[in-house]
Image (cartoon, grey):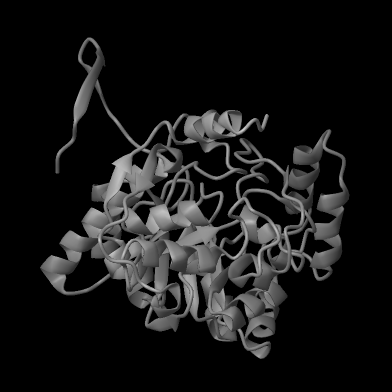
Amino acid sequence: METNLLTVGGYKTVRRAYGFDEVALVPGTLVIDPRDVDISWQLGGISFALPLIAAALDGAVNPAVAAQMSKLGGLAVLNLDGLQTRYENAEEVLQSVADAPADGVISFIQELYAREAVKPHLIAKRVREIRDAGGIAAVSSAPHTAKANAAAAVEAGANLFFIQSTVGSVRFESTHTDALDVRAFVESSPIPVIIGNTVGYAATLELMEVGAAGVLVGVGPGAICTSRKVLGIGVPQITATADAAAARDDYHAQTGRYVPIITDGGMKGGGDIAKAIAAGADAVMLGSTIAAAAEAPAPGYSWGMATSSADLPRGTRIKVGVSGTLSEILLGPAHKDDGTMNLMGALRLSMGSLGARTIKEMQQAQMMVAPTLQSEGKSAQRSQGVG
């Protein structure tokens, strides 16, 4: 793979990477009616009409939202380390987070997560609630809780299991705790295991080699995640997605097994979703956008999975407001012009404009560096006397 290394000084080299605002998609010679575009995909042997997953954030997903996402054709992931599995009255606790004053909200969130431990019977209850409502039960755990949580979730009927951490990898070393044997966990799991998050070719390839059914891509890109600021680590999502897609394609060519990659975080609207898929993603994972749905469990607010960390929180509570119903956000009609509603309609229109009939064809779309996109928009406003 071409690395395009630059020298920043001395012997230190860097690689230029690209985020969503730095690229644009290039139309070709064919335009397809958006109604004829197929945006379906598969994960773990399950087919989905929409390439969209609601992230395992307490402010975005509860059993009701998970069931509704399934009915709309997407998927939602429930956080097994979160408030839903710590409190019987989880909705009241979630409302208290939304109602808490901004001053001291991180300490308040930390205290709520520390006060009650995760309870196996609540894991089973939440999974059954999703299944009983007709939903696909996808659940998520951190690596150090994966074994215990998976036992209760699988017995209750979970369909998909996600292992998520700030940086996901096969190899982990520690003199203080036992590491999760990722290969053994995946091989022994009776349900598909999706692992994240990663940003590199080599790390993505290793996860696929141990049997991951899917890989989440993204370290520190989301609106509620502060990993880039707190830890200084992360890769802009266009480059991260393209690197992971290259690993997926090479692995598929070598083994015949296709492992979907899911771009997780950093997308602000339909245009970013289209760019993520054009960069190579099979689907995308959204958090704050789903938390802005009228049905979300913490009305108008969202916070990161690592916000509750006792030692080093890497996320904050943000006000996302209420954009509309979950159906309106995904399928329209849109009541806003900022690209945050009718996301799947926007994707279909983008794909059709590029002559892409399927997700796989969209992954072949031409992309150009367009760092002046925002300034062009401002210039257009000025030329029309607007602002």
Front residue of this view, candidates 264 and 271 = 271
**Residue drawn at point x = 60 percent, y = 46 percent:** 306
In the rendered image, residue 234, in percent from the top left (x then y), is placed at 42, 37
Position of 188 with respect to 329 (left or right) is: left
In this picture, is 216 found above or below 252?
A: above
Front residue of this view, candidates 153 and 341 = 341
The image quadrant of residue 47 is bottom left
In the rendered image, residue 259, in percent from the top left (x then y), is placed at 29, 68
**Residue drawn at point x = 75 percent, y = 39 percent:** 106
Q: Is residue 211 visible?
A: no
In the rendered image, residue 294, in percent from the top left (x then y), is placed at 77, 65
Front residue of this view, candidates 285 and 196 = 285
Question: In the displayed image of the protein, which residue is found farthest to the front?
Answer: 384
**Residue drawn at point x = 59 percent, y = 28 percent:** 382
Front residue of this view, candidates 189 and 354 = 354
In this picture, is 50 found above or below 131?
A: above
The image quadrant of residue 61 is bottom right
Quadrant holding the N terminus: top left
In the rendered image, residue 115, in percent from the top left (x then y), is placed at 79, 53
**Residue drawn at point x = 37 percent, y = 59 percent:** 277
In this picture, is 383 found above or below 235?
A: above
Q: Is residue 321 visible?
A: yes
Position of 311 with respect to 11 (left or right) is: right
Quadrant holding the C terminus: top right
